[in-house]
Amino acid sequence: MHTRIFKLVSLLTTSTLIAIGLGISTPASAATVVSVSIHWNGSAVGINDGYLEVYEYDSGDKRWNKTSEVATNGAGVATASLTSFAVYRYCFRAAISLVRSQHLCYGADSVQNATSMMAVGPAQNLGVINLTSKAAINMSSVVVQGRPVVGQRLRVNVDGLPDGVTDTDIVWYRDASISLFSVLGDNLGTGPTYTVQPGDVGHTIRAYVYANGPRVSTGGANLLSVPYLTPAVGPVVKPMGFSGAPRITAPKWKVGKTATYAAPSVVPAGASATFQWLRNGSPINGQTSATHKLVRKDKRKKISLRVTYSFAGYETTTLFTGQSPKVKR
């Protein structure tokens, strides 16, 4: 950025010296009239149907800020009177009823990458800028990721959006639905993530997402498009709290002895458990009770147990015990 500022200052200084060398007067009040002809789908727009936006660089904020905006006249021409020998960037948009217009800049799609220009002389013409409506974005890849469990953080996945998207608006809702062009439901906040709260238990969570860019938007050309809501996750449940972990025990790890499940020291009251015994990590057919009699096939193998706990209103949770020593004859 420092290099860019240095070049702009150098350009300004050089141009000023040239003006002085040519005997051109450059008072502080000197003005340059900058004009552009804005077209919509190949034809000049009408009065107030197009806009020329003027940006100047703010070295404090280190960004280009819009400092003025002028509308087109009846011939589709917008003109701005600017201080001569100052550096600007220009962007353009149309204001067509119920249509989302492209929002482009001189030399690039965005003001960050636009061409910097110095206002020189009494008049400067930017030529013809042809705009059209924005293209619609396929939002099917935009979903909520994460577990709908109290205390867990949910995230909207926007990784699949096209490169032309420059910003997204995300609003989280509880039990959201769409009515005409509005989103109904409890507003939970904004931003790319949301931490599930106790008050969400029993409810679903969705996110309203609006993606936008110079040439694209969620609704495409239509300003009255239906809002996009992600598929719902939930209903939200509580976490299944445990203290300790399940274990398996046996008098001796040898064929003929019985291995037994030992529950964690604390299991939520009312939770039920289902079992699957494992031999070297693979399920043992038919062994789905709290005990397993060690048989010849277990010899020289390690035994473990997969336990799944479930309870209404809580997250179904699966835990694994550690493996036994190798079973002996």
Image: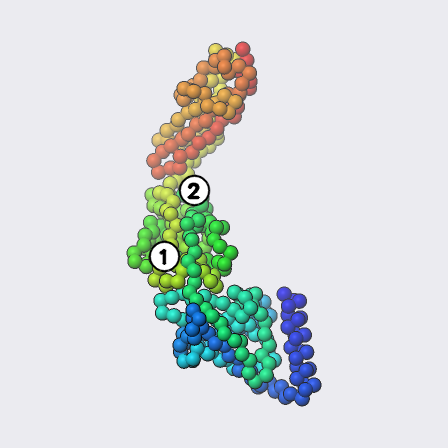
Q: Between residues 137 and 2, which one lies in front from this camera angle?
A: 137
Relative to 300, is 134 on the left or the right? left
Placement of 265 over or under 230, stated as above or below: above
Spot occupied by residue 189 in the image (x, y as percentages of width and height): 41, 55
Q: Which SS class for mark 2?
A: loop
Q: Which mark is residue 147?
A: 2
- For label 1, the SS is loop
Residues packed near mark 2 inside 10 Å, few (<14), some (14 to 19) or many (20 plus): some
- Residue drawn at the location 42% of the way across and 34% of the way down: 317
Q: Position of residue 217 (x, y in %)?
A: 43, 60
Which image quadrant: the N terminus?
Answer: bottom right
**Looking at numbered disc 2 in the image, what kind of residue is underneath it?**
Arg
**Residue found at the very far front of the displayed protein:** 42
Spot the residue most to the left: 179
Quadrant location of the C terminus in the rendered image: top right
The image quadrant that residue 290 belongs to is: top left
Can see residue 172?
Answer: no
Observer-nearest of 193 and 89:
89
Q: Could you tell me how far apart the alpha carbons at marks 2 and 1 are, in whole angstroms?
A: 24 Å
Identify the residue shown where x is 39% and y is 50%.
230
Q: Amino acid at mark 1?
A: Pro
Residue under the point 58% across and 67% down: 62
Q: Nearer the viewer, mark 2 or mark 1?
A: 1
First in residue order: circle 2 vs circle 1? 2
Left or right of 219 on screen, residue 37: right
Note whether residue 256 is visible: yes
Which residue bears the numbered disc 1?
227
